[in-house]
Amino acid sequence: MFRVFSLSLCLMLTAVSLVAQNKEQGRLESAGLVMEEILNLPDAIPQDLLNKAECVIVIPSMTKVAIGIGGSYGRGAMVCRSGADFDGAWGSPAMYAIEGGSFGLQLGAQSTDLVLLVDLRT
């Protein structure tokens, strides 16, 4: 009985892990498409500004909804440069989430792609 339970638990955890990996893979692909689309626009992010960025955060489809009280939510990826001064090659992505709330006179909903360039130098 215990073996059947532990086998079932292992299979369930493996399935959950695969679903999570597929979600993260999908987010990474969406973030890559957003960056590709933005960089192909005529008024794209200036190359010198992108070269100065130490990290880039891409949140595809950040959603904001409000009826008096509002909230915003989005998940995406962050990539930073390697090296002591963050001036090396781009590193591996890390999953990132942004959440927020607001209140006041507001009504509506929107979804937008968000790209943040981060400069950690002071």
Image: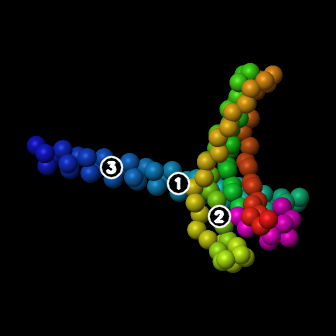
Residue 22 in view, yes or no: yes
Secondary structure type for disc 1: helix
Residue 110 placement (x, y as % from top left): 74, 35
Residue 55 lies in quadrant: bottom right
Q: Is residue 26 left or right of residue 12?
A: right
Within 10 angstroms of label 3, few (less than 14), some, or many (20 or more) residues? Answer: few
Crowding near pointer 1: few (<14 within 10 Å), some, many (20+)? some
Whether residue 4 is situated above or below residue 67 in the rendered picture = below
- Which amino acid is tagged 2? Val
Work out whether mark 1 precedes mark 3 in sequence or the reverse, and give the earlier one.
Answer: 3
Q: Nearer the viewer, residue 10 or 41?
A: 10
Query: Which quadrant holds the C terminus?
Result: bottom right
Give the residues drawn in magenta, as a range.
45-55
**Of pointers 3 and 2, the one earlier in the residue sequence:** 3
**Residue positioned most to the front:** 122
Judge whether residue 12 is colored magenta. no
Q: Earlier in the sequence, mark 2 or mark 1?
A: 1
Q: Please report the residue visible at 57 percent of the width from the left and 55 percent of the height from the top.
A: 95
Q: Quadrant for residue 77, please give it.
A: bottom right
In the image, 78 versus 26, the foreground residue is: 78
Image-based side of 74 in relation to 105, left or right: left
Quick one: label 2, few (<14), some, or many (20+) residues within 10 Å?
some
On the image, numbered disc 3 is attached to which residue?
13
Task: Tell me what residue is drawn at x 84 percent, y 60 percent.
Answer: 44
The picture places residue 68, in percent across and down from the top left corner, at: 74, 21
Residue 24: mark: 1
Tell me whether circle 3 and circle 2 mark residues in contact (CB < 8 Å).
no
Rendering quarter of residue 80: bottom right
What residue is disc 2 on?
Answer: 79
- Rounded to the nearest whole Å, what is the CA distance between mark 3 and mark 2? 28 Å
Q: x, y (%) of residue 116?
A: 75, 55
